[in-house]
Amino acid sequence: MPEILKDFSPPALIMAIEANQFELWRILAQMLQVELHHDPDMIWFSTDMPFYLCNLVGRTQFDPNDIDARIDVTLT
């Protein structure tokens, strides 16, 4: 079970909200049998459903000098 949040500073809240969202994606991927990738520089998942909430990229941490190329590769 996750720890109870005790630090309510804005940076800690942002990290907690993002971690919660990514954990939700992981759980949904298991339930819906979607393709989930948790890479060091991004988290993404895709489904056969043509709906934007079923096909997402999140927590991207690309090198600023390589952003356009990484976006192109991700979208292919």
Image: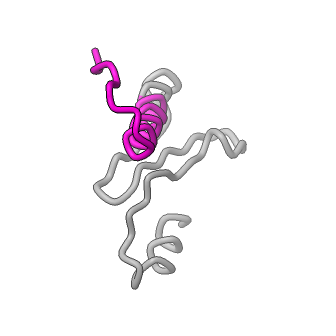
Taking the image as shown, residue 17 lies to the left or right of residue 2, namely: right
Q: Single out the residue that lies furthest toward the right.
A: 51
Residue 52 sits above or below residue 66 on the image? above
Quadrant of the snapshot with the C terminus: bottom right
Residue drawn where x is 32% and y is 19% of the image: 4
Image mark count:
0
Most foreground residue, 38 or 33: 38
Taking the image as shown, residue 24 lies to the left or right of residue 42, namely: right
Q: Which residues are magenta?
A: 1-26
Residue drawn where x is 54% and y is 45% of the image: 46
Most foreground residue, 71 or 10: 10
Quadrant of res 9? top left
Q: Single out the residue that lies furthest toward the top.
A: 1
Residue 41 sits above or below residue 58 on the image? below
Q: Position of residue 40 (x, y in %)?
A: 28, 55
Q: Position of residue 65 (x, y in %)?
A: 40, 85
Q: Position of residue 67 (x, y in %)?
A: 46, 77
Residue drawn where x is 41% and y is 49% of the image: 43
